[in-house]
Image: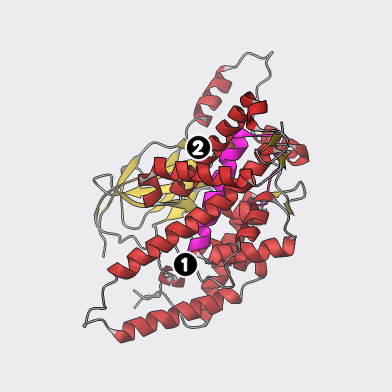
Amino acid sequence: MSFQSSRGAATSSDDPGRTEAFEAMVRAYAGLVRSAVASVGGRRVTEMAEDVEQRVFLQLWRQIENEQDIRHPASYLCTAAVRETVRLLKRELAIEDRHAEVSVQPAAPTADPHTALEASELHRSIADAIDTLSPRRRRAIRAHLAGYGVREIMGLYGWSYNKARNLIARGKADLRQTLIDRGIHGES
Amino acid sequence: MANRDPLLLIPGSHWQTAGGDHPSEESWTLLARGGLSEENRLTIVDHIVGCPECTRTYRALVSLEEGARELHPEMPAGDLVRAPNALGRPGTRALFGGISFAVAAAALVLLVDIPRASDPPSDADVTRSAAAERLTLQAPLESAVETPTFRWRPLDGAIGYRFELLDATAEPLWNGEVESADEHPWPAGVPMRAGRYYWRVTALLGKGGELTSELASFEIVSGP
C-alpha cells in the first residue's frame, strides 16, 4: 500500500478509504510513541496521555504532509515515530532537569567533605579497574553495572544468553581480583 | 575487620559513566531502522550503556519497535537489538523472518520436548510436563538461616531469571535480573536484618513469556 499526501498528485479526496486507513495507522503509531515514552517512566507523559498522543499524531501528520509519495507507509511511519520518540524524550528530560534544578537543596552544613572525596576516589578507582578488563568483559560489566538485564545485554551486543552470562560472571571475577590487587576491599 | 567482596562497594545497581556525545536524532534513527556500520553502532551502544538519559531513550525505542512489529510483522528489522547468528557471533536482527528465525526455532525444538501427536501422554509425560510448568525453589524454604544463598532448579528453555526479595509485609526489597541460572546471593545493598522474608524467581522465556515461582519464606535468625 502506498500513500500520496495532499501535496502529491493524488489528494485525499480521490481515495478517502485509503486515507482513513492511513490516518488510523498514524494514530496507532502515535499511541506507540506515547506508550514507549511512558514505559521509561515519563510521569508527565503518563499523566497527560491523551494530550501527548494528539500532539504526536499532529507531528507525525506534519511530517507526512511534507512528503510527496510514501511507498512503504509502515516503514515510513516507524521512522517518523522513532524521531518523535527521541524528540519527546529530549523535551521531557529537559523539563525534568529544570524541575530538579529548582528543587535541589544546598548540602547540609554537617556534610563530611572527606567522605565525599573518598567516594569520588573510589569511583575513579573502580572506573580504572573496569578499564583493565578485556573489551568484551568490559562491555558486559559496564552494562551490568548500569542496570541492564542479561536479555538487554544480549540484544545490545548480539550475544547468546550463555555468552552474556559468562562474560558478566568472568568480568565480575576479573574486576573483583583487580580491586583486591589494588588494595580495595569491601570492609565491614 | 573481615575483608568482604569489593564489588559490594559499587553503589546500587546503576553505575553509569557516560563518555562521548549523545547520538544525534539521525543516529538514533539509523540505529533504530538500520544503516549504521558495525563500528559506528558499537560506538553508539557504548555511549548508551554509560548514559542514563540515552539508556532511557534506547529502552523507549525498543518498546516502540516491539509495538511496531506487532502492527507490521513483515517490516524489516532495525539495529536496536542484535541477535546472535548461527555461529554465535553478533548478527543483524531478523527474529521474525529469515534464516535467524529458522535457526532459533530449530534450537527451541531441541530445548523443548514436544510430544508426537500420535503418542498419547504416559503418566511419566504428564508428571514431567506438570513439573515443567513449575519453577521450583530449593532453598531457603521455611527455614531459619544466617546468610542465605537463594537456589532454584533451572528451567528448560529459560533465557534468564529475575529474582525478587520482599520483607515480612511483602514489600519489595530488591527486584532484578540475575546472571546465574540457579542461584543468587543476598542482594547487595539490602541490609541483612533478623526477621521474616519472602522471595520468588521468574524464569524469562522466549518472546516475552515468563513463569513465576511460588512465593517462599524464610527467617534470618541473626544479623548485624
In the image, the segment drawn in magenta is B53-80
Q: Residue B20: give x, y in percent of width and height.
A: 59, 72
Q: Residue B144: give x, y in percent of width and height.
A: 29, 49
Alpha-carbon span between mark 1 and mark 2: 27 Å
Q: Nearer the viewer, residue B51 or A53?
A: A53
Query: On what subunit does the disc labeled 1 rest?
Result: B
Which image quarter holds the N terminus of chain A? top right
Please say if A161 is above or below B214: below
Q: Amino acid at mark 2?
A: Glu
Please say if B179 is above or below A182: above
Residue B223 can be seen, yes or no:
yes
Q: Residue at x 67, y 33 (%)?
A: A11
Q: Residue at x 61, y 65 (%)?
A: B46
Query: How is this picture coloured?
Result: secondary structure
Q: Residue B129: give x, y in percent of width and height.
A: 55, 25
Q: Amino acid at mark 1?
A: Trp
Q: Residue furthest bottom?
A: A114
Instruction: Indicate left or right for A142 with B169 as reference.
Output: right
